[in-house]
Image (tube, grey):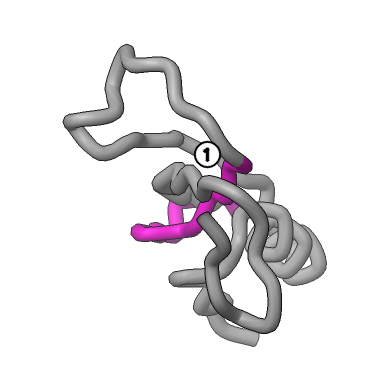
Amino acid sequence: MGFPDVLALEVSEALRILKQAGYTCEVTATEPPKSKGVPQEGSITEYVVRQRELDNNKAEIITVRRYRKGGVQDGSENQ
């Protein structure tokens, strides 16, 4: 089995897939530059934007945090 492709998945799903494939994972979270150090409102969703296979069944994933205002209903964002 090759290294799983987890790009663009939510971090919880990506970690589950990597664990099932036998990898331990190091996660680094990032935020857009305009959001760093500024308190954000709304629900946080974290997505994988970069992945890398390391030695000894280890993986590194880089995530970005997205803040959504309001709720999401029927695939559209309510504000």
Number of numbered labels in the structure image: 1
Q: What secondary structure is the magenta-colored segment mainly?
A: strand
Dividing the picture into quarters, in which one does residue 14 lie?
bottom right
State the residue lying farthest toward the front: 79
The correct choice, above or below, for 73 with respect to 66 in the image is: below
Residue 35 location (% of width, % of height):
29, 28
Residue drawn at x 65%, y 65% as measured from the top left:
72
Q: In the picture provided, is 67 more to the left or to the right than 21?
A: left
Q: Residues within 10 Å of mark 1 (few under 14, many from 20)?
A: some
Q: Nearer the viewer, residue 28 or 43?
A: 43
The correct choice, above or below, for 50 with respect to 24 in the image is: below
Dividing the picture into quarters, in which one does residue 23 lie?
bottom right
Dividing the picture into quarters, in which one does residue 49 lie?
bottom left
Residue drawn at x 36%, y 35% as measured from the top left:
30
Q: Nearer the viewer, residue 8 or 5?
A: 8
Residue 43, visible in the rendered structure: yes
Residue 3, visible in the rendered structure: no
Q: Nearer the viewer, residue 8 or 32?
A: 32
The correct choice, above or below, for 2 with respect to 24 in the image is: below
Residue 74 location (% of width, % of height):
68, 82
Residue 61 location (% of width, % of height):
46, 50
Q: In the picture provided, is 2 more to the left or to the right than 30?
A: right
Instruction: Inspect the image, locate mark 1, and give the three-letter code of the amino acid beneath it.
Output: Val
The residue indicated by pointer 1 is 27
Label 1 sits on a secondary structure element that is strand
Residue drawn at x 57%, y 62% as measured from the top left:
78
Q: Quadrant of the N terminus?
A: bottom right
The residues colored magenta run 43-58
Q: Nearer the viewer, residue 57 or 66?
A: 66
* Magenta stretch holds residue 26: no
